[in-house]
Image (cartoon, helix red, strand yellow):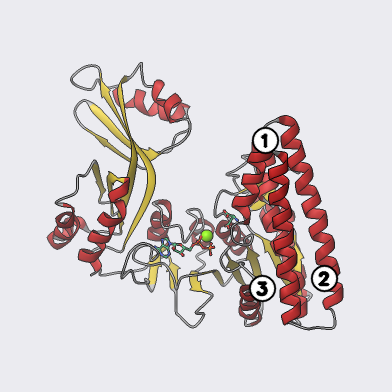
Amino acid sequence: MDIHVLKFGGTSMNDHQTWKKVLEIIKSYEHPIVVVSATAKTTRQLIEAGELAGSGNLDAAREISASIHQRHLDLVKNFLDENPHAKNALILESCTLKLEQKIGFLNKLLSYCHKLNDLTPSLKDAIAAVGEQISSYLLAQCGLATDQLTQFVDAKKVIKTDLTYGNAKPNLGLINQKIESLITIMEGGFTPIIGGFYGEAQDGTTTTLGFEGSDYSASLIGGAVHATTIEIWTDVSGVFTSDPRYIKNATPLAELSYFDATEMAYFGSKVLHPSTLKPAQERNIPVLVKNMFKPEDTGTKIIRDSISDRDALAISFKDNMALLTISAYETVMGYNFLRKVFKVLEDHKITVDAVNTTEASVTIALTNSLDLDEFTKAFIEVGQVSVQNSKGLISIIGCNLSQSTDLTNSIFKPLKALPLDMISFSKEKRIINMVVNEDEMITSAQAIHDTLFG
Ligand code: ADP
Ligand code: ASP
Ligand code: MG
């Protein structure tokens, strides 16, 4: 069986009209497995409701849950109105029941947060997953109204994970076993529709794979079924030279390697979740990024070996970064200074994006977080710490700096007037990372984009 795993994100799941488009795309495949996100904004609203309930405001949390309920019910009603079918009364009844059941469950979770006066990590995951649980069930039901044999599958039956709430690690062995249930459904002529983003730990609790995790669910499923392609259907025609929402004249890349696509995702190109490429790469499955509003556009194909003669491939950027400089108390670093610095990072489970060292200091670029203050205190024994907030990280991906002086000019010339806080370059990884002021990040990225790809 030539299986294609198709993933549709929040924007594709926005309203009854986009659902119609999604179902049309699904119809054009012989053996698709469909992975869907929650409808646009739902995950964020769910988490907000959990936070409100956990901080004493149960009424406001319940209001959000009621609005999610109503929005989804309206969506289904609008869909069924525009797609008349003999089964519609039954479909509406089953959608209404499911919504009541799921929103009832959500309200119970919210009450529990309220009682505990806390949104614990496990409750947060159980609450966040409700968005995908609803969207996958309702879309599968709406599929029946367009004469497709779509069947809802609860992701908890397939995506087995560890207990790391909020960023769960998949248990590949178990997923490979459980995937058989999807194959059986397909052999029966049905199209499985499964919610992305969430799964289940050994103890039966709900876990999530991290923000934007539906891409990862799709590639885990694609890897497990040895899919022919894993297709990420979104609102842009592929992976661009930079985020087209912010950077003028960004253009789609026809082809990209798993390696470069992963680096782009990691350094802020949020069109893909950073872990997406791993399961695909392990089984050498092409990942396609396609525009669901323009299915005729070629999109981007991500494969193992993509040869490019460009000096650089793309520019990623992310904001809300902090720069930490730890200076040794001695004027020259002792041989164990770096070990001590990295030990603090390890003890606090801090991942860093870029590091620079001089003869007596280390500068670290990392995502700013709530516990940064606490974390900086831990360096007191090691050296003097200074923190700079509101920084942005610009990453130039796939660059052959050492081969091209043009490239060096293209990158640094536009930055003449802008203060740089830090630069690091890895020839092996073909990446240049630069830290600038957050409010100058987009203009700087645009200026580099203009000279590199203009
Ligand atoms: P979905 O809801 O389909 O998961 P996302 O919003 O997560 O969609 O991802 C698509 C968005 O990613 C695009 O609208 C675009 O703004 C953003 N994006 C960031 N960097 C890039 C890039 N390099 N190429 C394409 N899109 C990018
Ligand atoms: N709904 C989840 C989120 O918004 C997962 C996803 O859309 O990929 O992060
Ligand atoms: Mg996404």
Q: What whole-number distance in Å separates the C-alpha atoms at marks 2 and 1?
A: 33 Å
Q: Position of residue 166 (x, y in %)?
A: 60, 43
Q: Specify the label residue 92 is tagged with.
A: 2
User: Tags 2 and 3 in contact by the CB under 8 Å rule?
Assistant: no
Q: Which residue is drawn at the image coordinates 30% and 51% (left, top)? A: 441
Q: Which residue is drawn at the image coordinates 64% and 70% (left, top)? A: 15
Q: Is residue 172 above or below residue 163?
A: below
- Categorize mark 2 by other alpha carbons within 10 Å: few (<14), some (14-19), many (20+): some
Q: Position of residue 225 (x, y in %)?
A: 64, 65
Pointer 3 or 1: first along the chain = 3
Q: Position of residue 310 (x, y in %)?
A: 25, 68
**Which residue bears the numbered disc 3?**
16
**Can residue 139 be seen in this snapshot?**
no
**Can residue 107 be seen in this snapshot?**
yes
Q: Which residue is drawn at the image coordinates 39% and 25% (left, top)? A: 376
**Which residue bears the numbered disc 1?**
54
Relative to residue 401, is residue 149 drawn left or right?
A: right
Examine the image and state in which quarter residue 354 appears.
top left
Assign a secondary structure to mark 1.
Answer: helix
Pointer 2 or 1: first along the chain = 1
Location of the N terminus by quadrant is bottom right
- In this view, the residue in front, 154 or 343, is 154
Assign a secondary structure to mark 2.
Answer: helix
Q: What whole-number distance in Å separates the C-alpha atoms at marks 3 and 1?
A: 32 Å
Location of the C terminus by quadrant is bottom left
Relative to residue 344, is residue 385 drawn left or right?
A: left
Q: Is residue 171 above or below residue 338?
A: below
